[in-house]
Image (spheres, rainbow, N blue to C red):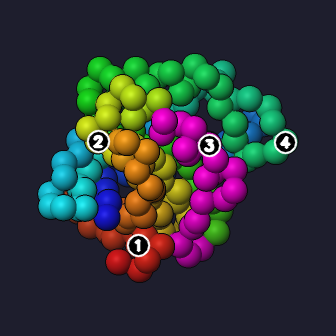
Amino acid sequence: MLHIRVTRPTWNEIQSDLSRAHPFASERVGFMFGRSEQVSKGQWLTIANEYVPVADSSYVDDIHAGATIDESAIRTAIQHALDTGKSAFHVHRHDHLGVPWLSRIDRVTTREIAAPLLVVAPAVPHGAIVLSRDSAFAVGYFEHGGCPDAGFVSVIGAPSTIRMGVDGR
C-alpha cells in the first residue's frame, strides 16, 4: 500500500497550476516529488513537498488525450529524480466529483513514465496521482517490474484533508 502525504503549500500549488487554462490542452500536467520510505512490509509512505509544472512549450497538440507532453518534460522529471533520489508522480486532474480512476491512456502513459524513473531511482516508488474536484487516486510502481500499488493521498497542514483512494481507505 502506498500512502502519499502532500504538504498543504505543495497541494495548493498543484491545485493552482492544474486550474490554469492552456492554449490547446484541456488539462494541465505536472510532477510532484517527495521522499519515500518503506515503513513496513508492503507499506510505503511518501512525504511530497515539491511540485514542478510542465512548461507550456512541452505540451503537444494531440486530440487523443486531454494533455500530451513531450520528452523534454519527462526528461526533466527523470533528471530531478536522479539528482534527488525522490519519488516522482505525474499529476493531473479529471473534472468530476468522486474518486477518480486512471483512463486507458493514463494506464499506458503512467507505466511509460514510471519505467525510466525506476531506472534512475529504483529504491523508491514512482507513479501517478489523478485528482478530481474532491478526491484523489494514487498508483505507484516499484522496482523489479512490480505490479502497481493503489494508494491514497492525504494533505498535511492546517486544515488536514484525506483524499480517499479507490479502495476507500
Residue 100 is covered by the magenta coloring: yes
User: Residue 153, labelled with which disc?
Assistant: none
- The residue indicated by pointer 3 is 109
Residue shown at 69% from the left, 36% from the top: 68
Q: Secondary structure at mark 1?
A: loop
Amino acid type assigned to the residue bearing label 4 in the image: Ile
User: Which residue is rendered at x = 74% and y = 40% of the image?
Assistant: 25
Q: Which residue is mark 1?
A: 164
Secondary element at image label 2: loop
In the picture as drawn, the residue positioned furthest to the front comes out as 144
| Overall secondary structure of the magenta section | helix
Residue 156, compared with residue 47, is above or below; it is: below
Q: Amino acid at mark 2?
A: Val
Relative depth, front residue between 132 and 168: 168
Which residue does the numbered mark 2 point to in the structure image?
Answer: 124
**Does residue 78 appear left or right of residue 85 in this picture?**
right
Mark-to-mark CA distance, 1 and 2: 22 Å
Magenta part of the protein: which range?
Answer: 97-115
The location of residue 48, given as percent across then percent down, is 29, 46
The span from disc 3 to disc 2 (Cα, nearest Å) is 19 Å
Task: State the mark number for residue 63.
Answer: 4
Which quadrant of the rendered structure holds the C terminus? bottom left
Cα distance in 3D space between marks 4 and 2:
33 Å
